[in-house]
Image: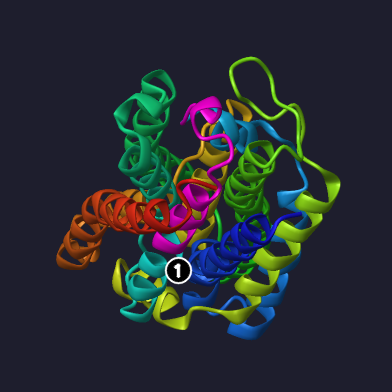
């Protein structure tokens, strides 16, 4: 391996860690806010299932690795991937420190597109793949909202025939299952993105074969295990600021609402991962929480908090793209001939 390739892998794993740190809230925000689990227990539980989910399949990884940019035009220029990862990791870090549950997917995709186009022009971007991914990113919170709303109506109807104490106890236990489901699908979706980036870097460095259209033929086992482990460690690191925003500030929820929100988000993420589409777990979870909150009472949703989150999401992709393009231009100046 060359020094540049090693730097790319380190930067990708740094983003993987930051993504786990920020997105740990996605799986455990509701289960912590409803006091079904303590923060420490919830984080360890989520980290374990994140690891298992990351080893699930390769569809999302292959989309990131070859479905967004033309690898043939980037051959030998691994500094582009380094710039993309540094841009994405920087943006995730800044937003996490401010307690904003921004999209790691937007950060990564924005950084990759910005760095690639900044160094070699817009022709390096695969428009068909971008359209699919952007459509999935937009639709995921909408689907989360709708499904969260519908599921809560259903479980409210079921709970109507149960005693209040039984409702809290039963759905408290069920929320542990839904939390685990959410954590597993988070690993299945988000860790796959970093696997795809590392696979792309390996293709550009001649360390991995690819199909005619630049998609990696497979994801090496060491890449899967490393990415899964780093994301698990990042999840275990917490991200308490984001947990408070998602689980405590966005809407008032109890175990029954938490179960509906987590289940809705998990279903959406599973469907998208099965299609190989890298969606935002943050968007999906926030959408499901707001859908559940609206079904309970529109007044229970803190729309002002939701508005700030939307602004951060909208800003993420272009901000990461601009930062990625600037870093790629710097890299091209120093390494463009290598």
For label 1, the SS is: loop
Residue lying farthest to the top in this orientation? 212
Between 48 and 145, the one nearer to me in the picture: 48
Quadrant housing residue 276: top right
Residue drawn at x 60%, y 80% as measured from the top left: 237
Residue drawn at x 31%, y 43% as measured from the top left: 118
| Left or right relative to 64: residue 330 | left
Q: Which residues are magenta?
A: 69-87
Between 37 and 165, the one nearer to me in the picture: 37
Q: Is residue 51 above or below residue 305?
A: above
Residue drawn at x 33%, y 45% as measured from the top left: 114
Return the x and y of residue 19 as percentages of the image width and height.
52, 63
- What's the magenta bit mostly, secondary-structure-wise? helix
Residue drawn at x 26%, y 53% as measured from the top left: 322
Q: Is residue 135 above or below residue 83?
A: above
Which residue is labeled 1 in the image?
254
Q: Is residue 286 above or below residue 31?
A: above
Quadrant housing residue 177: bottom right
Between 45 and 255, the one nearer to me in the picture: 45
Between 15 and 276, the one nearer to me in the picture: 15
Q: Is residue 155 visible?
A: no
């Amino acid at each position: 391996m060359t020094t540049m390739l090693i730097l790319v892998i380190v930067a990708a794993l740094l983003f993987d860690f930051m993504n786990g740190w920020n997105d740990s809230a996605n799986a455990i925000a509701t289960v912590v806010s409803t006091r079904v689990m303590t923060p420490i227990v919830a984080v360890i539980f989520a980290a374990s299932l994140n690891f298992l989910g990351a080893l699930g399949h390769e569809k999302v990884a292959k989309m990131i690795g070859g479905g967004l940019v033309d690898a043939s035009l980037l051959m030998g220029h691994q500094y582009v991937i380094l710039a993309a990862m540094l841009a994405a990791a920087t943006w995730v870090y800044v937003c996490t420190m401010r307690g904003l549950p921004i999209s790691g997917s937007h950060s990564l995709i924005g950084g990759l597109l910005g760095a690639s186009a900044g160094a070699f022009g817009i022709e390096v971007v695969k428009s068909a793949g971008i359209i699919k991914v952007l459509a999935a990113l937009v639709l995921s919170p909408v689907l989360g909202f709708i499904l969260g709303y519908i599921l809560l109506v259903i479980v409210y109807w079921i709970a109507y025939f149960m005693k209040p104490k039984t409702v809290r106890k039963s759905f408290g236990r069920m929320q542990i299952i839904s939390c685990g489901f959410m954590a597993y699908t988070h690993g299945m979706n988000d860790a796959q993105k970093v696997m795809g980036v590392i696979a792309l870097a390996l293709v550009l460095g001649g360390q991995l074969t690819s199909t005619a259209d630049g998609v990696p033929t497979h994801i090496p086992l060491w890449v899967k295990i490393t990415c899964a482990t780093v994301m698990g460690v990042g999840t275990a690191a917490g991200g308490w600021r984001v947990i408070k925003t998602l689980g405590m500030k966005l809407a008032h929820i109890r175990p029954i609402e938490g179960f509906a929100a987590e289940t809705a988000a998990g279903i959406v993420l599973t469907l998208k991962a099965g299609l190989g589409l890298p969606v935002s777990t943050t968007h999906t979870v926030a959408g499901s929480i707001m859908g559940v909150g609206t079904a309970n009472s529109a007044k229970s949703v803190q729309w002002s908090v939701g508005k700030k989150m939307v602004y951060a999401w909208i800003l993420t992709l272009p901000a990461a793209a601009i930062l990625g393009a600037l870093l790629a231009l710097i890299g091209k100046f120093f390494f463009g001939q290598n």
